[in-house]
Image (cartoon, grey):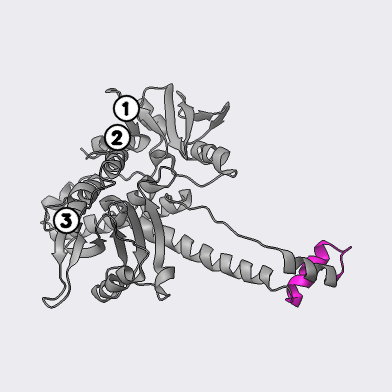
């Protein structure tokens, strides 16, 4: 599979090249959208996985793309011509109701540059259904991290659902905080502030609240927090265990005598990968994050050194590294944060070595 970052760079080049040219919807799909979908692991052309002009019923208006997992539609994507303004509410309104009826939670609307991701099933106004919006042409946006949430693997693992819950909660809390600050006559707030600043009178506090303009900003996360990653992995492990047990019960007695052993990514350490030679320490780790190049070192004992301090895991080091850019530590999955150069010189995620380790263990 072609790296998403490389595909997005090519799409940016095309957007510049086609700037003064009219692209209809079909040209937009071919030149700008399909390459991104392929980089996300969806096999466009495999009708079992990606159905174009999909209809739930013969009389329905078709959806441009429907993405399937185990023959169940999980994601709808509606494509628009390159110059269409996606902020027009009618585009979201047309597909949102249909997706809800079809039982499809996630909807994407794109013109090949901007991608808007909606939760079609949440019971809020259309504007509040919007989860993320990014433009590939905007080099400062989180396009790669956001679009990666739409990959086949991450849709299968339901990562987007976990991040949506955090987004939804943060938004409600932000609104509540803003309303609380804006309500200068809220006696409970004034009493609370009075306890903190005893030298001020309630009148002074009330006047100050009338002047204040506060904006609460919650950082956008594109990766699961470390504890959520462990929970998700545990759920996948349990599902796999149950599926294996079901298959065992359906086998004949002879077949059941020697079941194959399996192992998930839980418990795999960097030291394991060093010991079997998949990673050769000391090894330089790197990442390009928010226009900054961050570097760390994987040491022979499996720890990760960042800015002179050693951390027990890649995730701990990644959390601190991101904090040097954002101003505070942020829960981070180190396996999909740090990259290293493999024997061919290709820059790959640490997770590539972990997956190879598990593949060998399974054989």
Query: Which image quarter holds the C terminus?
Result: top left
Q: Determine the secondary structure under disc 3.
A: helix
Is 121 colored magenta in this rendering? no
Which stretch is magenta? 185-201
Q: Which mark is residue 278?
A: 1
Q: Determine the secondary structure under disc 1.
A: loop
Residue 237 lies, in percent from the top left, at 32, 52
Residue 41 lies, in percent from the top left, at 23, 47
- Give the residue drawn at x 32%, y 72%: 90
Q: Report the residue marked by disc 3.
A: 26
| 289 over 242 or under it: above or below | above
* 25 relative to 312 in the view: left or right: left
Q: Determine the secondary structure under disc 2.
A: helix
- Give the residue drawn at x 87%, y 65%: 200
Tag 2 or tag 1, which sits nearer the N-term? 1
Disc nearest the viewer among 3 and 2: 3
In this rendering, the count of numbered labels is 3
Q: Report the residue marked by disc 2.
A: 357
Cα distance in 3D space between marks 1 and 3? 44 Å
In the foreground, 315 or 196: 196
Is 200 colored magenta in this rendering? yes
Residue 31 lies, in percent from the top left, at 20, 47
Query: Which image quarter holds the N terminus?
Result: top left
| 244 over 185 or under it: above or below | above
CB contact under 8 Å: marks 1 and 3: no
CB contact under 8 Å: marks 1 and 2: yes
């Amino acid at each position: 599979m072609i790296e998403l970052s490389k595909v997005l760079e090519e799409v940016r080049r095309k957007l510049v090249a086609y700037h003064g040219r009219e692209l209809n919807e079909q040209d937009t799909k071919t030149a700008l959208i399909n390459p991104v979908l392929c980089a996300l692991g969806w096999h466009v052309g495999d009708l079992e996985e990606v159905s174009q002009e999909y209809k739930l019923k013969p009389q329905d208006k078709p959806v441009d793309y429907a993405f399937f997992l185990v023959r169940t539609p999980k994601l709808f994507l509606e494509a628009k011509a390159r110059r269409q303004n996606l902020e027009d509410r009618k585009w979201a309104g047309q597909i949102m109701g249909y997706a809800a009826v079809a039982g499809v939670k996630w909807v994407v609307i794109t013109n090949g540059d901007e991608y808007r991701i909606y939760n079609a099933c949440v019971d809020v106004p259309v504007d509040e259904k919007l989860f993320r919006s990014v433009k590939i042409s905007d080099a400062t946006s989180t396009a790669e991290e956001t679009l990666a949430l739409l990959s086949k693997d991450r849709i299968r693992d339901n990562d987007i659902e976990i991040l949506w819950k955090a987004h939804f909660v943060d938004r409600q809390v932000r609104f509540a905080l803003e309303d609380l600050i804006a309500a200068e006559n809220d006696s409970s707030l004034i009493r609370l502030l009075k306890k903190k600043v005893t030298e001020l009178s309630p009148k002074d506090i009330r006047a100050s609240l009338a002047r204040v303009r506060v904006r609460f900003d919650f950082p956008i996360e594109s990766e699961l927090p470390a504890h959520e990653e462990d929970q998700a992995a545990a759920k996948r492990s349990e599902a796999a265990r149950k599926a294996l047990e079901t298959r065992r019960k359906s086998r004949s007695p002879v077949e059941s005598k020697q079941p194959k052993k399996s192992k998930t990514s839980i418990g795999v350490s960097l030291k394991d990968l060093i010991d079997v030679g998949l990673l050769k320490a000391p090894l330089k780790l790197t990442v390009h994050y928010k226009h900054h190049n961050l570097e760390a070192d994987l040491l022979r004992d499996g720890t990760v050194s960042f800015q002179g301090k050693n951390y027990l895991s890649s995730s701990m080091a990644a959390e601190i590294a991101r904090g040097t850019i954002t101003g505070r530590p942020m829960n981070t999955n180190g396996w999909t944060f740090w990259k290293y150069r493999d024997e061919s010189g290709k820059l790959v995620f640490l997770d590539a070595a972990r997956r190879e380790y598990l593949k060998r263990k399974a054989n």
